[in-house]
């Protein structure tokens, strides 16, 4: 069930992103939006490099090799999803409309579904995840 739900979350994230692209509501010439999107991209790269050679799966599936707790994972448990949401939210904020808001909401809601699925599966595979989750935030330090 969790793996199926994670595929739905993945599809929602991609669908929301593609919707924003189709509406030309993802990118902006605003220096603030560009700065936030560059920051999001750098967070994504940092997380991806820290995660190492492990592959990304469409289906939430914990990988071999132990729990990653270094780099941005020292502070937040889901830096890649945080980066994805920051990137799209900056675009939505620059192009406020009902359609852009719905696409942005789809991305955020779908990321939350993926987080729920991944946390459940990782906790089942790695017992040390319970302690790790107590000492880190999900996406935004001191908020969530």
Image: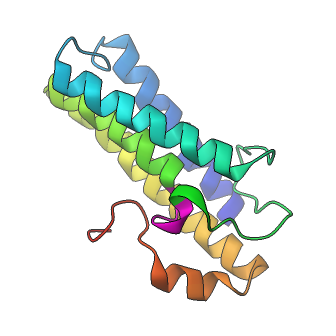
Residue 92 falls in image quadrant: top left
Which residue sits furthest front?
Answer: 71
| Residue at far left of view | 96
Count of numbered marks: 0
Q: Is residue 78 above or below residue 123?
A: above
Q: Looking at this view, is 3 or 141 the one in front? A: 141
The quarter in which the N terminus is drawn is: bottom right
State yes or no: residue 81 in magenta. no
- Residue 128 location in percent, x, y? 69, 85
Tell me: 48 left or right of 85.
right
Q: Residue at x 21, y 11 (%)?
A: 29
Q: Is residue 99 visible?
A: no
Whole-percent x, y for residue 40 in the image: 40, 37
- What is the quadrant of the C terminus in the image? bottom left
Which residue appears at 76% of the width and 63% of the height?
62
Residue 37, percent across and down? Answer: 34, 29
Q: Please tell me in which quadrant of the rendered image residue 67 appears.
A: bottom right
Q: Residue at x 22, y 26 (%)?
A: 33
Whether residue 58 sits left or right of residue 87 in the image: it is: right
Image position, residue 124 (x, y; %): 73, 81
> Which color scheme did the rendering employ for the protein?
rainbow
Is 131 positioned to the left or the right of 82 in the image? right
Magenta residues: mostly which secondary structure?
loop
Q: Is residue 36 left or right of residue 71?
A: left
User: In the rendered structure, which segment of residues is drawn in magenta?
Assistant: 73-78
**Residue 142 higher or lower than 129, as above or below:** above
Residue at (47%, 82%) from the top-left corner?
Answer: 135
Residue at the extreme right of the image, as rendered:
64
């Amino acid at each position: 069930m969790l793996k199926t739900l994670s595929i739905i979350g993945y599809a929602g994230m991609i669908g929301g992103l593609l919707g924003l692209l189709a509406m030309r509501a993802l990118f902006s010439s605003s220096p603030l939006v560009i700065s936030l999107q560059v920051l999001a991209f750098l967070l994504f790269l940092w997380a991806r490099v820290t995660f190492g050679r492990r592959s990304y799966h469409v289906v939430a599936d914990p990988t071999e090799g132990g729990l990653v707790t270094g780099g941005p994972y020292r502070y937040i448990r889901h830096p890649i999803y945080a980066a994805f949401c920051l990137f799209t939210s900056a675009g939505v904020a620059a192009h406020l409309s009902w359609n852009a808001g719905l696409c942005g909401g789809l991305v955020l809601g779908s990321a939350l579904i993926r987080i729920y699925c991944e946390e459940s599966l990782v906790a089942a595979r790695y017992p040390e995840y319970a302690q790790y989750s107590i000492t880190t935030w999900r996406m935004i330090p001191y908020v969530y």
